[in-house]
Amino acid sequence: MKAVIIVSGVVLGLVLGMYNGIEKPKALWWKFTVFFFVILLTVLSFLPPIAANFATSKYLSEALPEYNGNVLVNIIPSTLKFDTASSKWVLRIWNNVPKYKEANLAIYSKDLPEEFKASASTGRFVLKTHFDSKKNEFVYHSIASINPIFTFPVVPGLEEQIRIMNYHVPVAWISVLAYLFAMIYSISYLRTRNMEYDLKATAAAEIGTIFTILATVTGMIWAKLNWGSFWNWDPRETSIFILLLIYGAYFALRSALENEELKARLSSVYSIIAFLTVPFFVFILPRLLTGLHPGSVNDNSSGPVVSTQANTLNFLQQITFSLGFTSISLIFFWMLNIRFRMKKLISHIY
Amino acid sequence: MQEMMNQNTLYIVMAIILVIWFGLGFYLFTLDRKIKKIEQSVNDKLFDISDK
């Protein structure tokens, strides 16, 4: 199901993006559709609070002694009672995990927070808690959100940073797609010798490079948060760096040649050969070496996205992630459209 | 104000990103429109030359 949702986001982005080609100006409805998808992606990426289920929270509390994280709970107000011996409020709470449905929540305070009093709310909260395994209860710390409509799951080690995934991964994917387009247009140029294909190929390579740089920068920020430093020479970081050098050489080659015909021919051949390295650098090499990215050989899971465990990402997270692919693809196609038309205009003038 | 900022950091981040998207979107819209105008004028001129 997860794969279907993500792939349909990718396909929707491709089909909608390629609609009406990239030569003609895009229709107004198309531009508004792009805008709609981008706004929806941003709102869905940031509005839902991150909340674990009981099992994840218990696991994290046992693994990390200082853990104090968000848990999604439904309270049963009728079970509320005050335990005078240890001066705490005790409340029965439940969630949707079949094996671990109910638990106790302890509130170590004489005054019960207003929100827990009966009829104050429908009883759905995201609470900051930790699990006390000796007393077998969740210990209340504070309320993070009341009656959340949606929540994102807690992926151990990622927590709030999971929101970056909705942008970082699609941007990296678009850099591959853009270089693929550059290769396809280069082949078309060599077959037909039509200068328009050369313009399309360079436009795609330029935007591909922009997206590669964006993927690198967003990745660096994420690396600082999760791995401690901006640059770690992880296989994927190294390979994207080499990829930038390869495509840097493409632009150097183009700017070194005066003759338009020769420039188009040589750079087309270079672009085709350059793309042959992309699948190895992006999909194969990082999975063969030890590294920090999910999916490296020393990683005992393949990461929340590729993992075959269905519940690593909840439905909303899958939809938002898939929307990320659609929106970023649409932005790419809009940029490609504008860049190609600009290049065509310039070629008319000179 | 400070307390509100601390409690809703995420929503403030979201608002800032939305502002950036709106700004970029507006820029792309106007850029697209300008290019369309130039395309039309270039096409007109090309036809003028071929007519003569």
Image (cartoon, helix red, strand yellow):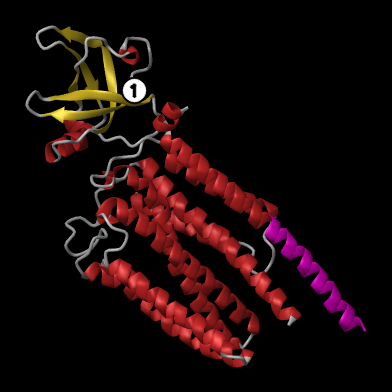
Q: Where is residue A220 drawn, in percent x and y?
A: 35, 59
Q: Is A100 contained in the magenta span? A: no
Q: Nearer the viewer, residue A338 or B9?
A: B9
Establish if A61 lies above or below A281. above
Rendered image quadrant of residue A81? top left
**Which quadrant of the rendered structure holds the C terminus of chain A?**
bottom right
Please name the residue that numbered disc 1 is placed on. Answer: A124
Establish if A162 lies above or below A77. below
Q: Where is residue A226 drawn, in percent x and y?
A: 27, 52
Q: Where is residue A64 drawn, in percent x and y?
A: 15, 40
Q: Where is residue A54 drawn, in percent x and y?
A: 21, 32
Q: Residue at x 43, y 53 (%)?
A: A167
Q: Residue at x 34, y 12 (%)?
A: A114
Q: Amino acid at mark 1?
A: Arg
Q: Residue at x 46, y 41 (%)?
A: B13
Give the residues drawn in magenta, as a range: B30-52
Q: Nearer the viewer, residue A6 or A83?
A: A83
Does residue A74 appear left or right of residue A330 in this picture? Answer: left
Q: Is B46 contained in the magenta span? A: yes
- Characterize the magenta stretch by its predominant secondary structure: helix
Does the image show residue A305? Answer: no
- Badge 1 crowding class, 10 Å Cα cut-off, few under 14, some 14 to 19, many 20 or more, is many
Establish if A290 lies above or below A138. below
Does residue A158 appear left or right of residue A201 in this picture? Answer: left
- Which residue of the protein is positioned furthest toward the right in this rendering? B52
Does residue A311 appear left or right of residue A149 in this picture? Answer: left
